Amino acid sequence: MNDILLEVNNLHTSFFTDAGEVKAVRGINLSLEKGKTLGLVGESGSGKTVTALSIMQLLPNLAKITDGSILYKGKDLLKLSQENLRKIRGKEISMIFQEPMTALNPVFTIGEQIREAIELNRNVSRKEATTQVMKLLESVGIPEPSKRINDYPHQLSGGMRQRVVIAMALSLSPEILIADEPTTALDVTVQAQILELLGSLQKENNIAIILITHDLGVVAERVDFVAVMYAGIIVEYASTQSLFAEPLHPYTQALLNSIPKIEGEDKKLNTLKGSVPQLAALPSGCIFYERCSKKSNNCKDAVPQLIEVKEGHLVSCCLYK
């Protein structure tokens, strides 16, 4: 039985601005299995969120998918009408957005916002929808849901708002959940609670998750497979165990080396010099050349391809041919 729910093939997404074309995502290939978690990691500007928005077909007006396919259960989402997309979006593929305060409408109660999706997509009465909303709020750990259902977003803490957004994303029982940095701006204790909640909900409902995060500690604990993104491409892809045991790309190695360590002598924090190149003016050769600690003269003009170096472990680097 094939457990692959989602396949992204050769995805290219660009922003068309007055200054020219900005190639935000360039040739992404991903797959997601039922009940598994795929982590997308990389610095800001690497293309993680644009990849997620491309899958959801929620790109801003300036952006356009220029090539590739996004297969959900074998059906190409890029070829569907807006009406058919709406039947999938939220109901079968849902998304937790990065900032809950902007994801929620400030002039409606949280109960109204969650209930709207249920009433639009399920043939239930308002009373039944309200009952479902309270069960959802309870399932995500919000106390006294019968009272909280009438609260407005500003009346809730950041952690509570994030729980509401998760409840909204799960309201139609999706098979795929895309979580875009779901613990951003939350304190460490609340972060742990939110991640624990997502993990338990995944087990209960066998949901497949794409987790976008900067936190490699979260990746190590919560993710089955990792795609490391840099300047719009995937530079390394592997199981979490393989990636942390033997990172192959110099960029992945630099990310892991930058994690603070509590044991041993006091040392300066390892940092990666430079920044992600401008996507409107990408270099002709290796995009990581200027920042790479292992570069040679042969690397500058080379354009490495993503190849399988070990079973299930792919890397895009001139060091591996």
Image (tube, rainbow, N blue to C red):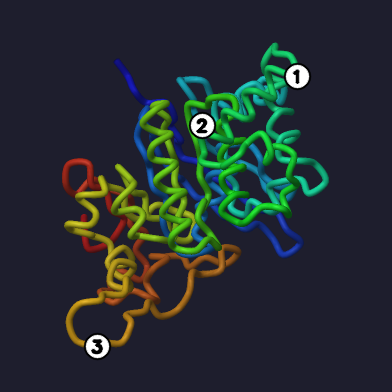
Q: Nearer the viewer, mark 2 or mark 3?
A: 3
Residue 84 at what x, y percent from top left?
Answer: 66, 20
Instruction: Identify which amino acid the numbered label 2 is placed on.
Output: Ile
Q: Nearer the viewer, mark 3 or mark 1?
A: 1
> Mark 3 highlights which residue?
266
Residue 219 at what x, y percent from top left?
Answer: 34, 53
Q: Which mark is residue 70?
A: 2
Q: In which quadrant is the C terminus drawn?
A: bottom left
Residue 186 at what x, y percent from top left?
Answer: 53, 61
Mark 3 packing: few (<14 Cα in 10 Å), some, or many (20+)? few
Nearest to the observer: residue 199 or residue 283: 199
Q: Nearer the viewer, mark 1 or mark 2?
A: 1
Q: Is residue 31 left or right of residue 231?
A: left
Mark 2 packing: few (<14 Cα in 10 Å), some, or many (20+)? many
Instruction: Identify which amino acid the numbered label 3 is placed on.
Output: Asp
Q: Residue at x 40, y 80 (%)?
A: 273
Mark 2: secondary structure: strand
Q: Which mark is residue 126?
A: 1
Q: Is residue 132 left or right of residue 267?
A: right
Instruction: Identify which amino acid the numbered label 1 is placed on.
Output: Arg
Name above or below for residue 43 compared with residue 75.
Answer: below
Q: Are marks 3 and 1 in contact (CB under 8 Å)?
A: no
Q: Is residue 224 left or right of residue 191?
A: left
